[in-house]
C-alpha cells in the first residue's frame, strides 16, 4: 500500500526502468546510488536491481483505495537458471 502522492513518481520510475537496456540500467542504478538521501527522485534502487536480475520488463499496476492510499502491484518474471 502506498500514498497516492507517490503513485505518479513510482509509475514514472517503472516506465523509465522498462525502456532502458541492461547497460543503461546499470548507469541509472549508479546515478540513484550517488544521490544524497532525502533527494526527491532518489531511491528505488531495488526496482532497478530487480529489473537487472529478472531480465524481463517490470509488470505493475495500481488500484486506488480509500483515504489517499493505493495498492501497488509488482509482478516480476525471473528465468530459472
Image (cartoon, grey):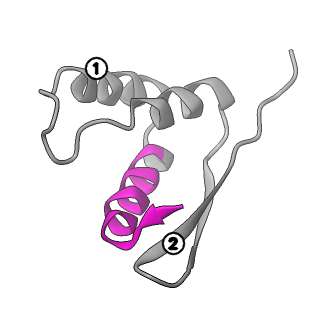
Residue found at the far bottom of this picture: 66
Disc 2 crowd rating (10 Å Cα; few below 14, some 14-19, many 20+) is some
Q: Main secondary structure of the magenta part?
A: helix
In the shown orientation, is residue 53 left or right of residue 69? Answer: right
- 3D distance between C-alphas at marks 2 and 1: 29 Å
Residue at figure coordinates x 37%, y 30% from the top left: 24
The residue beneath circle 2 is 70
Q: Against 51, is 12 above or below? A: below
> Can you tell which mark lies on residue 68?
none
Q: Is residue 45 magenta?
A: no
Q: Quadrant of the C terminus?
A: top right
In the shown orientation, is residue 56 left or right of residue 78? Answer: left
- The answer to which quarter of the image holds residue 77 is top right
Q: Against 64, is 61 above or below? A: above
The residue beneath circle 1 is 30
For marks 2 and 1 on the same chain, the one whose residue lies earlier in the sequence:
1
In the shown orientation, is residue 40 left or right of residue 62? Answer: left
Q: Is residue 12 magenta?
A: yes
Find numbered disc 1 in the image and state the secondary structure of the residue it sits on.
helix
Residue 41: x and y in percent read 22, 46
Find numbered disc 2 in the image and state the secondary structure of the residue it sits on.
strand
Residue at figure coordinates x 62%, y 46% from the top left: 57
- The answer to which quarter of the image holds residue 38 is top left
Disc 1 crowd rating (10 Å Cα; few below 14, some 14-19, many 20+) is few
In the shown orientation, is residue 4 left or right of residue 76? Answer: left
Q: Against 14, is 49 above or below? A: above
The magenta segment is: 1-17
Determine whether label 2 and label 1 are within 8 Å by CB: no
- The answer to which quarter of the image holds residue 72 is bottom right
Amino acid at each position: 500500500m502506498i500514498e497516492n502522492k507517490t503513485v505518479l513518481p513510482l509509475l514514472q520510475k517503472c516506465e523509465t526502468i522498462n525502456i532502458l537496456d541492461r547497460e543503461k540500467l546499470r548507469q541509472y542504478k549508479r546515478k540513484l546510488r550517488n544521490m544524497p538521501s532525502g533527494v526527491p527522485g532518489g531511491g528505488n534502487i531495488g526496482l532497478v536491481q530487480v529489473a537487472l536480475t529478472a531480465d524481463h520488463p517490470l509488470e505493475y499496476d495500481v488500484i486506488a483505495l480509500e483515504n489517499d492510499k493505493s495498492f501497488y502491484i509488482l509482478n516480476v518474471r525471473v528465468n530459472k537458471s
